[in-house]
Image (cartoon, rainbow, N blue to C red):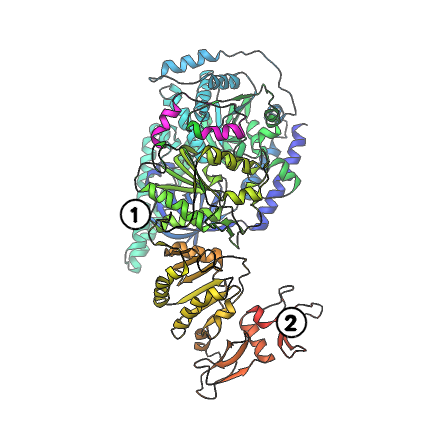
Amino acid sequence: MKYSEYQKEFNQALDDEIKYLRKSGGQKTFLSDGTLLDKRKRSGQYIYSFTTDTELRFPDDTPVDLEYKGKKYSGILVSVEGFDIILALQNNLGEKIAVATLYTSPWFLLEELKKRLLEACSPKGANKNLAEILLGGTKEPSTSPKVNTQQLLDKIQQRLPQAIRYNEYQKAAVNQVLNRQVSFIWGPPGTGKTSTLGLTVAALVQAGESVLVVAHSNTAVDTAMKSVAEYLQGTPVYENGMVLRYGVATPGALEKYPQVHVRGVARRQNPKLIEEIEKLEKQRKDLVKRSRHEKLTELQSRNIQEELASVKQALVPLKKQLKEKEAELIKKAIVVGCTLSKAVIATEIYQRRFDAVVLDEASMAYIPHCVFVSILANRRIAIFGDFRQLGPISQAETTAAQNWLQRDIFDEAGIIQKVNKQEADPRMVLLKTQYRMHPDISKIPNHLFYNNQLEDSSSVRQGTMPIVQNQPFPGAALIFYDLSKVSPFCLSDQQSHSRFNIISALIAVNLAYQNAQNHQLSIGIITPYNAQSRLIRRLLQDLHLTDKSVKVATVHRFQGAEENLIIFDTVESSPQSKPGKLVTGGIQSTAMRLANVAVSRAQGKFIGLVNYQYIQHKLDSFNIFRKFVDKLKIHSYVEPFVWSANTFIDLPEVTYFQTINDSLKQIKLDFQQAKEEIAIDWSTSITNSQFLKQLLQACNHRDIRFFLTGETSKHLAIGLNNTYVWNNKANKSIGLVGIDRKCLWVYLTPNLSSTPVIRINLAQTTKLLYSFLRLVPEQDPGSITEKLSQNEHPFGKCPDCGQPLWYQPNKYNDFNITCSKNNTHYERSINEKDTILIARLMDIHCPNCNQQVQAYKSQLGNIRIRCSQRNCNWSTSLKDRI
């Protein structure tokens, strides 16, 4: 295929993705704990870090709007790491931002990419031949090696004070790039891929070539440029500001190499300009601070605003001059590093041609992105990455999107197919020696994902041994916690459908908490699901463990990171009928990539939390995740968990009780101390809910609201005031009791009196679980007290005491109209008019067509409700809808 044919197919795939993203309306995300990072003043923008409850998946350098105190401010997304997000804003909004709202339009970058790919169809400039070779449509001409790689490496060594260390595979990779137009460098975890990339760029520069270094994320670009700077420092190219990081780097990533920052070079070449800009920026910052925090008269406020406007006006020509200077530096630079997104939108990049392009983390990049950067190269492109790790993320489900946005460049080029057949490919070099993982850990991914091609370095066992000797289980690098016997129920957040598991989350946090107390190991908790990641993070926040102590993220956000100890929470368990899509499939599936990334993040200890019986029962033996779990269990120290008096959960404000009877004293106290509401979801066994009924009755005459759902809710509601009985449509096999949205009781097997019980008295965690579990309705219908306080008396007044009448459950599990103060004063049977009033108060509609309901009397004399639409046959009893 010719480039023009590829471009048409790329265009369709990108259109499909844009259409999907536009239909979803972009994304609105609530942010908190905003902090101005002063370290980044040299970027010319104001860098803020925020915390969010939801992991974001947007490309770095995505344009964003931040809404704060009713105004919107423009900026770009610098990076997302788990639940921490860094933004670069054009305005100074103060030192702290308590809450703000982030708006993103991710389709903007895809529209720009479409433009760049279309522009390349013109006859001028673009190296379309290189793109066709990259995609496998054109064969690269065979030529004998022209560059003496060893001579170049020796020259690099002569300049550096320390010895360069590289193995035979890394040298082969450098040689491959120097002597081919298209090269694929396959770098499995811990094999020195980044170091090889830096050495390759240094060799290209030594050979007289200009290089563009790109990756999908700012973090990846910073890591790559750090390696490049290590090999080029001391050279005229580096010292004269011709090795540049373009865009906003992640805070602290390149602190040791100030020469690679564009503004740092501009400062050396034009110090007066930078000093004047920073002086005015400080004035503006101080004025903004005064205008917000001081009690000002109208005259003082007007004077500050006039002074602020003057400062802003003075900054305009200086900023323009600086921008022109930065553009000039980028055009002259020998090495430029930036994100793929930046390359698409920055004219300084896409209107220039480089001798070579080096693309890192290529498995996560869209194929059209890879092709775009290839047309910026005059001579060669080098693809660095690992196709056994996470691939690109696309939302559209069309054929075009699946072909071009959900596969990686290794797949399209035919590399993966040859590797799976164990055939050599002259375009590819495999980095075989791994330096990260203890050999007991590395043998898992090596056997399952890399065909036993990897080698452990001679020093890695000894280097990771201090980690292995730490708790838990000193001497064990692999630990398998089997949760089969502790009922680790797996549920789904009803909004996002992402899965979570309260028991495995508590166990993961307990392991991290106990290790963090010793401050000996860096710890990471990885999980496949966003909901579980959010739950674990809330638990850690309630326990005052910061991200510096324990890092938490989904597998997608952990790629590229590593920690001493990794805890992998698989989440999967009953009552889910089958495991989620993330853990199903064979080789090259998402499940394979997730398992590989999870295990290969660990340096010295890897702990798997697995319901092994569930995985065995639900996944076939050929499933790659099942193979991973089986392999892990065979080679690990296995610790089976059972509930016992000596619980394995030892966390502040989390209490374990062996039976319901053991918990009665504490839950009775919690009910007595309840101030606002009690929410109960009890799905089974009226017998085992009697203790709850007694506790509820004891609270009945206090101003407490009751939210009841589950199979026994109507039984529990009998005789209660201020009660809302509803159906949250959740199929749960557990019992839940929430108190004031601050404390949550979990009964693992409520049909048994011997059920284990867990009390979670952590406010933020409980609040999140309320949302996940839908313990209260999203639209609160309001309590009797609230209705009556608004003078709503839809059923009339009691003839005895004059108090309003209200509906109440009776002993026959139906409803009567009674006195809201004392049901012995007045009581009558419910009629059709009452039924319609209740339906409107409770906002009951037909579930099939969302029409209002009518009341009618059945042949048996019972009052029922039905759809008001004539051609709809839906009907039910009122008690089934409340």
Report the front residue among 24 and 314: 24
Report the front residue among 526 and 168: 526
- Amino acid at the residue labelled 1: Asp
Q: Which mark is residue 866?
A: 2
Q: Quadrant of residue 845?
A: bottom right
Dot 1: within a 10 Å radius of its alpha carbon, few (fewer than 14), some, or many (20 or more) residues?
A: some
Q: Foreground mark, 2 or 1?
A: 2
- Amino acid at the residue labelled 2: Arg
Q: Quadrant of residue 224?
A: top left
- SS of the residue at dot 1? helix
Residue 716 magenta: no
Q: Which residue is mark 1?
A: 286
Residue 447 magenta: yes
- Please give the range of residues in magenta: 441-467
- SS of the residue at dot 2? strand
Mark 2 or mark 1: name the one nearer the start of the chain. 1
Residue 329 visible from this viewpoint: no
Identify the main secondary structure in magenta. Answer: helix
Dot 2: within a 10 Å radius of its alpha carbon, few (fewer than 14), some, or many (20 or more) residues?
A: many
- For residue 270, above or below residue 487: above
- Tally the marks: 2
Looking at the image, residue 859 sits to the left or right of residue 230; the answer is right
The answer for how far apart the CA atoms under marks 2 and 1 are is 66 Å
Q: Verify CB contact (< 8 Å) between mark 2 and mark 1.
A: no
- Residue farthest to the right, as pictured: 871
